Every structure is written in structure tokens, then in C-alpha cells.
Image: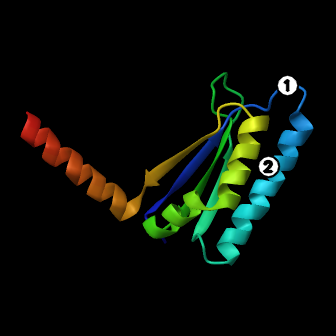
Amino acid sequence: MADTGLFIGWGVPVRGREAKALAVFGESMQYWSGLQQQGKIDSFEVGLLDPHGGDLGGFAILRATPEQIAALRLSPEFQRIVTRAQLIVDNVGVIGVNMGQALAEQMAIFQAQLAELA
């Protein structure tokens, strides 16, 4: 399983556009499933948060290699689906994420810099 990926987070639908937001969510799920079937990502997982008054309402984590992530982020279809989501849902964000061995490598960099700056 890949140790890097994309964290895609979103908030609540734009008021009055909830049905459209649900449709775009369905499109996104189909898109991510297709990426997995085509081998363009390793896997994906989606979570919806309980109501809590914060800006984050749900998220998806797409696991892929760094090369797959770079290609994905530059693809017109990925940019199209993210743009659709941004137009219908508040607080959409796409952020790289490190997990597993990649997390250990990031922590090693942090510790080395901490020691150097102490």
C-alpha cells in the first residue's frame, strides 16, 4: 500500500444546492473508484464527520505513489471534479499527505532540523 496520498476535505453544501452537492459527491466517488480500477491510485477511503460546528464535514484519502499523485493533480479530469466541488460545497481543500514509511521520513527531517535549530 502506498505511503503517500491526497487528503481531500470539504465542508457543508452551499445552501439551496444540496441536491447538486450530492450529485457531485456521487461523481467524485465514481471517479475515485475508476482511478483505483485503472491502477492510477492504490485505494481510497471516504469519511463523513458527525455534525460538530466546524468547517470540515467530510474527507477522502486517496493512496498513491508520489508519481501517481503528481500525475493525478495535473490531470484535467481531476481539476474539473475539484472545481465542480468548489462551486457547490464550502471549504474544499486538496492536501498531500504522508503515511507509513513516508511519515517516518518526514519525522526524521523534522527531528534533524529541530536538533540543528536548538
State the image coordinates of residue 47 (x, y, percent, origin top left). Answer: 67, 48
Residue under label 2, please give it: 25
Number of residues whose C-alpha sits closer than 10 Å to that of mark 2, classed few (under 14), some (14–19) or many (20 or more): some
Q: Amino acid at mark 2?
A: Phe
For residue 32, above or below residue 86: below
Tag 1's secondary structure? loop
Q: Which residue is mark 1?
A: 15
- Residue pictured at 54% horizontal, 63% vertical: 63
For the residue pair 88 and 44, the one nearer the viewer reads as: 88
Above or below, comparing residue 50 to residue 37 in the picture: above
| Residue 17 visible, this orientation | yes
Q: Which comes sooner in the sequence, label 2 or label 1?
A: 1
Three-letter residue code for mark 1: Arg
> Residue drawn at (8%, 41%), measured in percent from left and top?
116
Horizontal placement of 23 versus 3: left or right?
Answer: right
Residue 67 image point, x, y percent: 46, 69
Q: Name the residue rendered at 55%, 49% in the picture.
A: 7
User: Residue 49's quadrant in the figure?
Assistant: top right
Is residue 92 found left or right of 2 in the rendered image? right
Which element is circle 2 on? Answer: helix
